[in-house]
Amino acid sequence: MIRRIEPDGAGRAPLPRRYNTNLLVLMARDPNSAHAYWDIDLARISDGLAILDGGKALLRLFDAATGESLAEHETSAEHGRYDLALPWAARAYVADLALVNDGRAVVLARSNIIHAPPDAPNADKRPAEAVFVERADQSRALAAGGMLSWTPSARPGELPEQPIGLASHGAVAAARTRMPRNGLASEARLAGIGLERGSEDRP
Amino acid sequence: MQPTRDDRGHLVVFLHAHLPYVRHPEHDDSLEEEWLYEAITETYLPLLAVVEGWLRDGIPARLTVSLSPPLLEMLRDELLVRRYTRRLHRLLDLAESEVHRNANDERFRCTAKMYRDRLADTLRRFETCYSGDVVAAFKRLQDAGIIEIVTSCATHAFLPCFDLRYARAQIRLGVRAYREHFGHDPAGMWLPECGFAPGIDRLLADEGLNYFLTDSHAIAYADPLPVFGTYSPVVCPSAVFAFPRDLESSAQVWSAAWGYPGDSRYREFYRDIGHDLEGPSITPFRLPGGGRKNVGIKYHRVTGRDVPLHEKQPYHRGWALAAADEHASHFVSDRAQQAEHWRTVLGRPPVIVAPYDAELFGHWWFEGPEFLDLVVRKSARDQQAYRLSSPADVIDSGLGFQVATPAASSWGAYGYSDTWLNGRNDWIWPHMHHAIEALARITADRPDAGGIQRRALNQLAREALLASSSDWPFIITMGTMVAYAESRVRSHINRFNSLLAQIRAHAIDEQWLAKVEDCDNIFQYIDYQDLWPQGGNGEDCQKL
């Protein structure tokens, strides 16, 4: 029977409780937390429990790069949602939902990989070879449907001793790519304006 | 045209105009439709008047405006335009009666006349000058070269909460909508809520877009680190420019704690005669159940941050305009100092990007259009440290730009996805993701549907698109109009699921489909296949 909800009633009708998608979805919320939800078919859960001769469901978080297990949370196997703490910003994570019993596990669903955003400038990402391009380079790249790359007209700038972006995390010695050097060090304290986290003051 | 080589910095003033798609043909007097009507009267028409004034007076102005596709569609919807005109006539009648009612009240007499005169002028301009077509009025100003209009995602979806495949569909249809309304391709895109994650830039490039805006930390945390900090856009490896928001200029206007709009002389938003007035003149503005609502006529000023509404003092237009003048001077002076300072530090012209929600100007902050007018006029007349530019002007200025990938971010609270993904609204996402996945699959399964199947598939796409507006989880988080936002999510998801079942069963109820098409009629030109250039499945399924 197909449910036809009249336009006036569609906003009041309840939504489906679940869709039996057999999916575990992981969503990066901020540098330190993620949200997971899942919806597992009952037959799959029954099969898993039969294999293990019983067991409990765990939501497990892993470092996506190393496979290291980072956290386990006992939960419902069928469907649910959970907010996960992430130990590090700017890392990739993956989760699974597994039935476990006596050291054995049956994975019911594995999540997508997420990338937690950075929460600070990463000093490891200093521009060793800063690439600068001009409008013409961009036009060429867009016209070619490709990516910007080293082309004869793309050229490195003079390297800064410290990029402007690091200002609030330490003294800026200079930021002198294609710029005069005088007076820069004394301006370091002001260079961090762009690093203050914006408060949400929207009226 | 600005000189291509110039020592002055760039100030990019950017207004993002957006409202969720709200249209209720089934109700003659929908409270939520008034969001649009209020914005036309209080923001869009006043902004048009301000820009037309610059054009008339030969001011070397430059303003960038994003008009979101839902807003464009509503501004050109016959039913909404008709209802707006009717409302404006009723409001003018009310304002006229207020002039008589306050004729002997020194406190409010001038303010009542001000509203009457403004509304009469608004009605005249809307009907006579613009023939009811606000979009065409904006287009004329773009054609005159004084504003640059860009687009946004199709239904203002917060892209970091979707996979790249759906982000592509949102961007693609956003460009298509712009083309439908303006006849050419947009130069740039406002990413809803400045929501960005690496990979989205590639999608923008694929649609031929040149630039987008981010919050400041997207650039401050970029990879590699930006040598010019947040005082220059960067170029993504995908060849699209990312312009960072300048927090200093933003906070001066936005901050609830110390932003300009909190000045005691400005008009108080929350005290409205819709709630104060008794008698028959306000009756037509009552809600169907007899409840009260704002009508936009407000006689009081902010007075003080902690002053309760009933103790607010009468509004004095002269004082308010003096405040706008002072604040515009302050803003221009600060930007000039900022530009001069950073020109010295960087050794090249800094780029200061000041983006705001357009509806702040005029609707929330009544004197906002006058402030903006004065900022532009003073910028042109009173300083030499910066010029007013659009992002396209900056790109064409001859500067070199660093190649870097911005960091995932948004301009919401805490800078990431918290506002759109939290304990109050996370129930939305399983339904949303299921709908997107189902839409992609059935699109791939039915590549050449015709007749009623095609109509149903197009409507299916509309329902998924309307459900995914960033406004619904935002409203739920903010705790305002929660019931309405929840109802909209439920209605679109329920209609989607019903349609999906009918399409799969080859049993489409045409009469019911026609009703739904009438209710959710956005994007009459939509083609469900065009959303998914790879047939709905492809390399973009990765969650962001």
Image: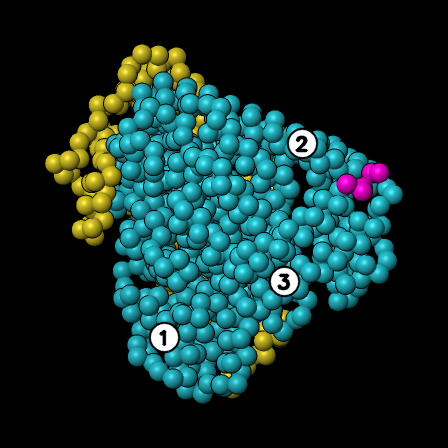
Chain colours: A yellow, B cyan
Query: Is the residue marked by circle 1 packed among few (<14), some (14-19), or many (20+) residues within 10 Å?
Result: some
Question: Residue at coordinates 43% horizontally, 35% vertically from top-left?
Answer: B60
Q: Amino acid at mark 1?
A: Ile
Compared with B153, A166 (above or below) is above
First in sequence: mark 2 or mark 3?
Answer: 3
How many residues crowd around disc 3 within 10 Å: few (fewer than 14), some, or many (20 or more)?
some
Residue B162: image x %, image y %? 41, 57
| Region in magenta | B106-110
Marking on residue A13: none
Estimate the x, y position of residue A99 in percent, counting from the top left. 42, 62
> Is the residue B27 above or below the residue B159 in the image?
below
Tags 1 and 3 on a common chain:
yes
Three-letter code, disc 3:
Thr
Q: Residue at x 74, y 35 (%)?
A: B316
Q: Residue furthest left?
A: A152
Q: Which mark is residue B85?
A: 3
Task: For mark 2, give the secondary structure.
Answer: loop
Q: Nearer the viewer, mark 1 or mark 3?
A: 3
Please say whether residue B504 is one of the residues in the magenta stretch: no
- Residue at mark 1 to residue at mark 2: CA–CA distance: 54 Å
| Most foreground residue, A8 or B441 | A8
**What residue does disc 1 label?**
B442
Could you say whether the residue bearing mark 3 is in a helix, strand or loop?
helix
* Mark seen at residue B263: 2
Spatial CA span between label 2 and label 3? 33 Å
Cβ atoms under marks 2 and 3 closer than 8 Å: no
Between A115 and B228, the one lying in front of the other is B228
Mark nearest the camera among 1 and 2 is 2
